[in-house]
Amino acid sequence: MTRCDVAILGAGPYGLSAAAHLSTVKGLDVRAFGEPMSFWQSSMPVGMLLRSGWQASHVASPNESLTLDAFKEATYNHFSSPVPLDRFVDYGLWFQRQAVPNLDRRKIVRIESQPKGFGLILEDGETVRAGRVVIAGGISSFAYRPPEFAGLPSSLASHTSEHREFKKFPRKQVLVIGSGQSALESAALLHEAGAEVEIVARAQHIRWLGGLFSRTIHSGFGPKLSQLLYAPTDVGPAGISQIVARPDLVRSFPRPLQDWLRKRSIRPAGARWLVARLQNVPMKLGRSAVSAVPFGERLRVKLDDGSDRTVDHMFLGTGYRVNVTRYEFFSPQLAQSISCFHGYPRLREGFESSVPGLHILGAPAIWSFGPLMQFVVGTHYCSKALLRRIAGKTAGNQIPVAEPLVAEVG
Ligand SMILES: Cc1cc2nc3c(=O)[nH]c(=O)nc-3n(C[C@H](O)[C@H](O)[C@H](O)COP(=O)(O)OP(=O)(O)OC[C@H]3O[C@@H](n4cnc5c(N)ncnc54)[C@H](O)[C@@H]3O)c2cc1C
């Protein structure tokens, strides 16, 4: 059995950023686990472009030295915004080599609470004891499939996260459900791969990011007004963007206001550069698919207007629903001890859950810290807050050299 002060589960943007920050603390034994950038490599479509802008796509590093610009310069890469997925994955892997070279790529299969810390079991059976555990496990466990489509074979209906590429769909009839970025971008890529695509969405109209209002503010009134209304974090509409960029402020508001800000900031929407790519894709808006049954080798899908269509495949662009108790690596007893609201953990300062020493980062933290935490840009606030809590120091320009406040491992 090996021991460490802090174990980090996950090597996506949040886990890597947390590891990079905590490793700067002298005397703190930090171990990070997971396959780097695996969600971005396995669950996002080839050809995807990042929806977040350049400034909002840097993963936070100590001293902010490992930015997209630094990556471009160090590797002679040439790309700009919107950032292509494969360049972002390369950036994440470069970040890992620079800041977390000792990453342990093994999966953690079980975490349980123990006196004075946690016990972790790795995929090869090795056990590790840690004083604290930081969960940065992402959203892949939370892909949402509406119950009316449960039980359909994956050859006929699948979640958008199950597809990397669309080569097998030329001339196939494909129905895409949803009006968020994943649904719309999948529809565009399918269309470009030669599929006959139709989009069905409950929304009465598609909400495009960067609409006339925001473009007028950005270009028509000069940079001052634009900077006043929109924070560089790039999350949320005019004005609200500046509020949600400050998680400490968001946390000080009454709960109904926090909920409203969250909903207002992360509504289903598509990036503006998808408009032209979808102009020849039919959309049935204000309608829902209510049932789907196999029909020979195809699928018959019924809508709530009574119409039906028979298609080769149905893509569920139905998003993700956070419920941390669905993380398979938590022992049942530990999962039950985490105080949650509708699946979101109640987190206090330093992203610490109701279980002392257990920290949860990324999308599960949006209920406590606001919508920034759903995006890469949230790493800037999150890693500093985590560092403050664990090392008792702020992440400034100097490398903090503090006595760690971690629980002693038993
Ligand atoms: C289609 C799509 C497009 C998106 N586009 C953007 C965008 O443009 N900009 C943006 O900011 N955000 C975007 N997002 C959101 C994005 O997913 C998050 O910003 C980001 O991935 C959060 O990072 P994370 O580290 O929390 O999670 P992830 O990137 O999902 O990383 C989780 C990590 O945990 C590891 N892990 C999981 N379980 C275990 C285990 N048991 N043991 C060890 N390791 C484990 C995984 O291997 C993985 O490395 C997009 C999401 C989707 C679905």
Image: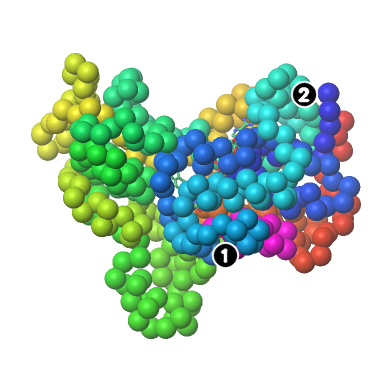
| Percent coordinates x, y for residue 294 in the rendering | 22, 19
Which of the two residues, 357 or 55, is positioned nearer the viewer here? Answer: 55
Q: Residue furthest front?
A: 76
Rendered image: mark on residue 127: 2
Which residue in the structure is indicated by mark 1? 246
Classify the position of ligand 1 by quadrant: top left, top right, bottom left or bottom right: top right
Q: Quadrant of the C terminus?
A: top right
Residue at coordinates 29% horizontally, 24% vertically from top-left? 156
Q: Quadrant of residue 250?
A: bottom right
Mark 1 and mark 2 lie on one chain; the one further toward the N terminus is: 2
Residue at coordinates 63% horizontally, 62% vertically from top-left? 73
Q: Quadrant of residue 240?
A: bottom left
Three-letter residue code for mark 2: Thr
Figure check: 325 above or below 397: above
Of badges 1 and 2, nearer the viewer stands: 2
The reply to whether dot 1 and dot 2 touch (C-beta < 8 Å) is no
Three-letter residue code for mark 1: Arg
| Percent coordinates x, y for residue 390 in the rendering | 77, 50
Q: Secondary structure at mark 1?
A: loop
Rendered image: mark on residue 161: none
